[in-house]
Amino acid sequence: MGKMIDAAIGRIEAAEGLDRPGYTLGKAISRTGQVAGRPSKRLANALHGRPYGHPIHPIAVTVPVGTWTLAFGLDLLAAVGLLRDRGASRAADLALKAGAAGAAVAIATGLADWQHLNGRDRRVGLVHGTVNTAALGLNLLSVALRGRGRVAAGRWASGAAFAVMGVGGYLGGHLVYRRRAAVDHADRSPEPREFKPVLPLSELRDKVPHRVGVWDEAARQEIGIVLVKQGGRVHAMGARCSHAGGPLDQGWVLDGTLVCPWHGSRYDLATGQPASGPSTCPQPRYVARVQDGTVEVKREQEPGDHVVTSDTLAGRPRHGIGDGVPHRTATEVLGEHHEMLRRLFGRTLALPGDTAQRHELMRTLAAELDIHEAIEDAIFYPAVQAVSEDVDIAYAEHGVLADLLAATVKFPLGSAEFEEHLRALHASFLHHAGSEERSMFVEAGRLSDGELRALGHKLETMLDNERTSRFRRAFRELKISLLEGV
Ligand code: FES
């Protein structure tokens, strides 16, 4: 099914015959805007959603989608006799009219965004808009038919519109989720976290954008930054335009803004905010300074970012807990548990077939994996969250491990499926433990020795409790039995 839909959409993407009508419509919109001048620019910005910092089109479409779905539901219930015909018919009529009003706004906002699409996206966008306009036409026909007392025919028309709207919605989803139209295309790397020299000031010419790059080790890629010197100040923002990825370093400076060469979005040099669309999204910002004739930049982290920098570490409260506590550190405790799990995996994988010994080993392995997840989730991750950015991924990896474990134990021990899943579970664990040891455990070293030892003590206590508590063991046994389907 998915393949057939992909093939159908692929045909739309390749349909060069759509370029001529697309070009004509696009030119008509832009010419109208050019003739109308400044007011039309303001209207276009409002339709893009620039003043609200978010595209308006996805919000506008909720009105026709919601109301037309309501009308379809009411018609359906009335048709099967679950609602009184007259009341349902009036409510459906009202919903269709409200949806038509919302659809007009959705079409206006959609057209404003569509005219800045290119190539295959523009073709799909054209079909998406045409299909949804057809849905609007069918619904208006339905309203007219209902007004003349032809309720049954009106219901058929709006029923057809509902199906057509589904096709239009699918194409819209394809444009956003598959083709990444209208999503943020800027590189939002946290690098560089501290001031980093990037260019001799003498190489910057006034009001001429200049691209420099910094390396992001986690993303394994170079991040482009565009520098602009103006009025004795150096400004810096992401070089990749958030609208569709245009090269801002090849743009130009105009009236205190940097203009993108692709669709003309203008970004305020001082703030990175879009002063004019189609972009609605601010550019990544960098603090720039000049030290000994060299421009240095530092990423200005964004609200909601979880980025560990020297500033965030300095602001972290130090409790001094655990100082002088004679326990092993948290990373020693967890490292040892990793090693035990590695050995358990090794022995379980080395034993062939379906033997009682292997069954026992598998149950121990499942229990220890469960305990490992519990102690890290409850104690270690919350404690290192402030000093490590790896925690979110580590939680997600626990989810992958738990899913794989649940899938593995469902197969008969020794079956081909069991062996394949056990190897996958092993690979998942090795990745998880290895990346923790290489990165998160190193970053945990930013905690004081006392804190790490106090954490180690807590981890050991919980490990003991998890293993020895009768209630917890019984619960774990039950859980594994349920997963095994015993
Ligand atoms: S890529 Fe479209 S305005 Fe920059």
Image (spheres, rainbow, N blue to C red):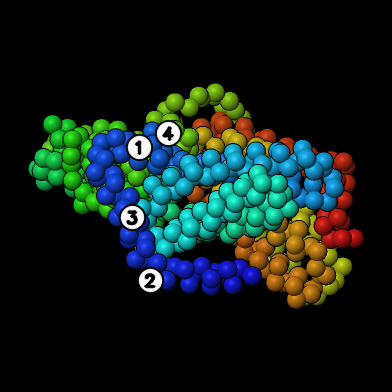
- Tell me the tag on residue 16: 2
Q: Cβ–Cβ below 8 Å for labels 3 and 1?
A: no
Mark 4: secondary structure: helix
Mark 3: secondary structure: helix
Q: Name the amino acid type tagged 1.
A: Leu
| Disc with the residue nearer the chain's start (1 vs 2) | 2
Q: Cβ–Cβ below 8 Å for labels 3 and 2?
A: no
User: Can you tell which of label 4 and label 3 is closer to the viewer?
Assistant: 3
Q: Name the amino acid type tagged 2.
A: Glu
Q: Is residue 276 left or right of residue 436?
A: left
Q: Residue at x 77, y 37 (%)?
A: 87
| Disc with the residue nearer the chain's start (4 vs 3) | 3
Q: CA distance from mark 3 to mark 1?
A: 16 Å
Whether label 1 lies within 8 Å of ligand 1 gets the answer no
Q: Residue at x 25, y 36 (%)?
A: 38
Q: Is residue 249 left or right of residue 376?
A: left
Which residue was labeled with disc 1? 43
Q: CA distance from mark 4 to mark 2?
A: 35 Å
| Disc with the residue nearer the chain's start (3 vs 1) | 3
Whether label 3 lies within 8 Å of ligand 1 gets the answer no
User: Can you tell which of label 4 and label 2 is closer to the viewer?
Assistant: 2
Q: Name the amino acid type tagged 3.
A: Gly
- Tell me the tag on residue 256: none
Q: Cβ–Cβ below 8 Å for labels 4 and 2?
A: no
Which residue was labeled with disc 3? 26
Task: Work out which quarter of the rendered image holds the N terminus and state it.
Answer: bottom right
Which residue was labeled with disc 4? 52
Dividing the picture into quarters, in which one does residue 430 lie?
Answer: bottom right
Q: Residue at x 62, y 60 (%)?
A: 428
